[in-house]
Amino acid sequence: MTTSHYIAGRWVEGQGSDCISVNDPALGQPFAELMAASVAQVDQAVTAARGALPAWKNTSASERAAYLRGFAEQLGQRREALIALQMRNNGKPRHEAEIDLDDAIATFGYYAELAEQLPSKNRDVPLAAPGFSARTRLEPVGVVGLIVPWNFPLVTSAWKLAPALAAGCTVVLKPSEVTPLIEQAYGQIADALGLPPGVLNIVNGKAETGAALSNHNGLDKLSFTGSNSVGSQVMRSASAQCRPVTLELGGKSAIVVFDDCDVGQAVEWIVAGITWNAGQMCSATSRLLVQDGIADALLPRLQVALEQLRVGNPLTEEVEMGPLTSQAQWLKVAGYFATAREEGLQCLAGGKALDRDGWFVSPTLYADVPKDSRLWTEEIFGPVLCARRFATEGQAIAEANDSRFGLVATVCSADLERAERVADALEVGHVWINSVQAVFVETSWGGTKGSGIGRELGPWGLSAYQSVKHVTRCLG
Ligand code: NAD
């Protein structure tokens, strides 16, 4: 893997001042480093994207679809390398790294299909008024900046890149400094496919590079996935220039378990919802609401399941959960363990960092957590589950909705009518019923309230990179 930046169809060395260490979190040690892009290089990338736009937006939809299919195919050809890199740099267990790769492949395939349907979307609009005709044109938004986090690097970038390219936009992608090598694959694939220079640019770097991109006045739109604190800075930059922004931010999602559930099945769903990717998911269901009638049976089994989870180095051990991906994240989660002790929370499992090299913590369960606890209200981004009990359906809905976030929720119940009713009442962007974290490219992704603005995936993900134009003609 090359360790630099892809600008105007060329690989270039970083000229910024930050040196980025790429770490193996299971050992807590670096295995590569690269220099960040400078502010001037970000400018070159935006200029290249601007220069490439007129030709790219006028390519036929089927030509763009062919490139997208090429991305899907080439990702498949790089399968083993990309799985190994995600395991090493993210600390993902193998099966999770495989799911991520398959998700990225499916995303490019799906948007290739939507690209092919684009010509049929430009159609006449029937008017009630006589004497006029009107037609719709869906045009690309233009040059877009894409800033992404480290927890699902292949996937989050694919969810932005594929629809943006399908729509006819040109892009500058800024991966996270925690995982700067993984998305280099997209640049290599662009090279291999002969994608016109400047259509896809990749600049790596930390906050300075991200800010240089989000403040750049050569962008027509910015799509950001990451934390709420950085998201609000990105939104400020967008508002200063009055330009659109998509924000995919944090979550503190509920999993609601009714007392008609099979206990063993519910435990499986709960554990998966908080330990996949070591809990580093915006969509982690980190608030467990369990009905009184099942709580006493469920909590002890949940405790055992979490304690028995195989935690270790995905590269050398058969594991179900790897380390946290960065030292910063490990320190943050350890800080929440300290807060839990200060708040006197009842810890049923975990609650500590593991005594071994690397950035490991044990899967953790706190019971009967007060509603005003920081652990109940704040996004932790680790395998830390907080539980509360509820008596009635109404109480469960009220508690689940009592959050400044609104990304996802899971509802577990044998009564499907009730499950559907509760799903409809939850103030979130996506609800799973009797399943966990299943994301399909045809459905939408994104949240309400503090979890963001806009939607990715599905046709909504494509619309995010399109501008609607109407042409109205007087027939007289
Ligand atoms: P982060 O906000 O720290 O960083 C995200 C990206 O922004 C990185 O590329 C970073 O370099 C860049 N950045 C940092 N400072 C910047 C600045 N001032 N201006 C512009 N860019 C800047 O987030 P993270 O720690 O990488 O990721 C974790 C967060 O992402 C969590 O809050 C999680 O919930 C959220 N997330 C949300 C979704 C979603 O779909 N809603 C998906 C994944 C992650």
Image (spheres, helix red, strand yellow):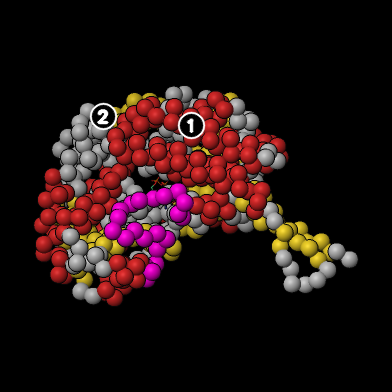
Name the spot of residue 36 as percent of width and height, x first: 48, 32
Q: Is residue 455 left or right of residue 29?
A: right
> Magenta stretch: dominant SS?
loop
Q: Is residue 143 among what the camera can see?
A: no
The residue wearing badge 1 is: 73
Name the image quarter holding the C terminus: bottom right
Whether ligand 1 has any atom under 8 Å from the Cβ at mark 1 is answered as no
**Would residue 473 be found to the left or right of residue 450 on screen?**
right
Where does the magenta region start and end?
424-444
Judge left or right: residue 36 versus residue 356.
Answer: right
Q: Amino acid at mark 2?
A: Leu
User: Of the residues shown, which amino acid type is indicated by label 1?
Assistant: Glu
Q: Which residue is mark 2?
A: 315
Residue 332: image location, x then y, percent: 29, 48
Residue at 53% x, 35% y is 69
User: Which numbered mark, 2 or 1, is in the foreground of this view?
Assistant: 1
Q: Is residue 429 magenta?
A: yes
